[in-house]
Image (spheres, rainbow, N blue to C red):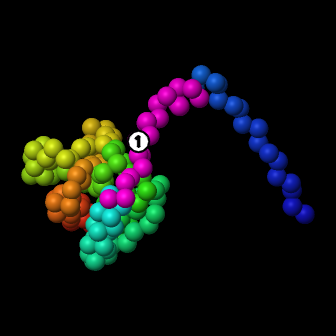
Amino acid sequence: MKAKKTKRNRPKKPLRQAKEKRRAMRERPKMPPIAEEMKQWSAMLKTEVSGWPQVSSRPMFGMLGVYRGKKIFAALPVSRAIGTANSVAFRISPMPPDLQQRALGESRLAADSETGGVRRWHTFEIGSTEDLRDALWWLNQAYERTK
């Protein structure tokens, strides 16, 4: 005959510790809704990126996570974007010095989150169809560095 399992009564954390833990959490990034024009641009980028080897995509938080194998390297907006309403996000961690130099001169590029001094996610602001070529270049850089 099996013995009954009893519930363990764990001591609750003091209220002060719980409040401190909540304050220590990172702020959520702003995720504004995107315009119809951005939906079209994002769909065009998705079509191009989907043709690359080992690329798959999954919906996430109003965006489309783009993966190379099991590693995420980009987020394309579907109904929401990270940062500004007209931006795509990509991950390059760590960013090599040559790319870092190019990123410093790029006004449409912003680093969104820092973890331990390392910027992992970057956003690229798209203002017109001419910017799609440069956005695709940055997405390709993220893809190449995700292995």
Furthest toward the top, the residue is 16
* Residue at position x 39%, y 69% in the image: 57
Q: Is residue 31 magenta?
A: yes
* Residue at position x 82%, y 47% in the image: 6
* Three-letter code for the amino acid on which mark 1 is drawn: Lys
In the rendered image, residue 86, in percent from the top left (x then y), is placed at 30, 51
* Residue at position x 30%, y 73% in the image: 47
Location of residue 43 by image quarter? bottom left
Q: Residues within 10 Å of mark 1 (few under 14, many from 20)?
A: few
* Residue at position x 22%, y 52% in the image: 127
In the rendered image, residue 130, in percent from the top left (x then y), is placed at 16, 60
> Which is more toward the observer, 115 or 143?
143
* Rendered view: 115 above or below 58: above
**Which residue in the structure is indicated by mark 1?**
30
In the rendered image, residue 39, in percent from the top left (x then y), is placed at 36, 61
> Which is more toward the observer, 146 or 80?
80
Q: Is residue 50 magenta?
A: no
Picture quarter with the N terminus: bottom right
The region drawn magenta spans 18-37
> Which is more toward the observer, 127 or 120?
127
Secondary structure beneath dot 1 equals loop
In the rendered image, residue 122, in percent from the top left (x then y), is placed at 27, 49
Picture quarter with the C terminus: bottom left
Is 47 left, or right, of 103 in this rendering? right
* Rendered view: 64 above or below 89: below
> Which is more toward the observer, 126 or 68?
126
Is 24 left, or right, of 5 in this rendering? left
Is any part of residue 72 visible from this angle?
Answer: no
